[in-house]
Image (spheres, rainbow, N blue to C red):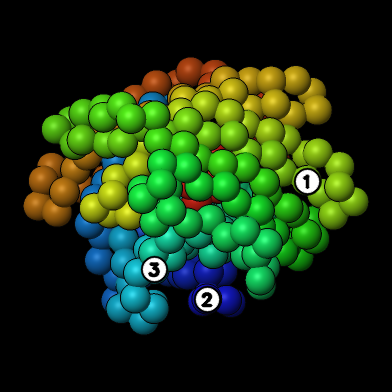
Amino acid sequence: MIRGQLSPVALAILCGGPAMAADTFALPQGCDAFVTIQSRSCSVEHHFTCAGDPEGVKRRVSLGEEGLTYVGTTDRESQWLASFYPLIGHGEELADAPADPASLSELLEKGVDRYDFETTSDEVGTTRYVGEDRLTGQIVTIDDVALQQTAYEITAYGADGTELWSSAGNEFVNADWRTFIGGTGTVTVPDGPFDKNDSPVEFIYPGETGFLSANTKFDCGAVLSSAPPVTQKEISNDHL
């Protein structure tokens, strides 16, 4: 686990000079991106690896109309190692010894993966996440990329066991990249449910126009959700 590294990376991105010069997002030194994804809900994300990270670790940043919204790190099993949300100054890290670690390998081999893990945060303390991902058997091709569709359910609990939010819907998995990609779902918070659509529209690769673009393209200028900002967080497997 790469504890303690996320916030410095986030700060380097936020404070390290012209990160979006010429409408291009600048990665931290020693990092290389392998794909840019333009998605619904006015979001663009960049997936990359960094030379100093352990093998299998991947990083992702997401941007919206308001700028950088998310910086996250996952491992080879697509476990959520650490996340930082610049707009609200909130960070989380995976706690030690998960009761049932998330496993992309199990999902791909058995068609279902159940998980039960906790994260720690200086702002909110401990949060427990319980849920499952299932392969639906459907292959969906978007912009010439074949993706395996999943169905998911996830619930987040506070340290006292109170349910904070839940979400259910469909996402995608790219087995070659060993990563989850956003889809559609319904999130239920204390104020009520809201729908989201983070489905990919375009996949852009190194050397192609739009790679590492800092500009979002789809569904921008629309009112996307009435949920309070603290609930509009993107966990690394995109369930929320």
Residue 167 pos. (x, y %): 62, 31
Say left or right for 209 vs 218: left
Quadrant (top left/top right/bottom left/bottom right) for the C terminus = top right
* Horizontal and vertical percent position of residue 203: 22, 39
Residue where numbered disc 2 is placed = 1
Residue farthest to the bottom? 52
Residue 120 against residue 204 in the figure, above or below: below
- Nearest to N terminus: mark 3 or mark 2: 2
Secondary structure under the numbered disc 2 in the rendered image: loop
Q: Is residue 229 left or right of residue 163?
A: left
Front residue of 145 and 64: 145
Question: Considering depth in this image, is 193 or 32 the residue closer to the camera?
Answer: 193
CA separation in Å, label 3 and label 2: 9 Å
Q: Is residue 75 above or below residue 203?
A: below
Q: Is residue 206 left or right of residue 160?
A: left
Q: Please give the residue where the numbered disc 3 appears in the rendered image.
A: 57
**Residue 85 appears in the picture as rendered:** yes
Residue located 26% across and 60% down the image: 33
Q: Position of residue 137 (x, y in %)?
A: 33, 30
Residue 30, horizontal then vertical, whole percent: 29, 76
Marks 2 and 1 sit apart, C-alpha to C-alpha, by 23 Å
How much space separates mark 1 and mark 3, taking CA atoms? Answer: 26 Å
Amino acid found under the numbered disc labelled 2: Met
> What label does residue 185 carry, if any?
none
Residue matched to label 1: 157
Tell me the kind of residue under disc 1.
Tyr
**Residue at the image point whose x is 47% and y is 62% from the top:** 73
Label 1 neighbour load within 10 Å: few <14, some 14-19, many 20+: some
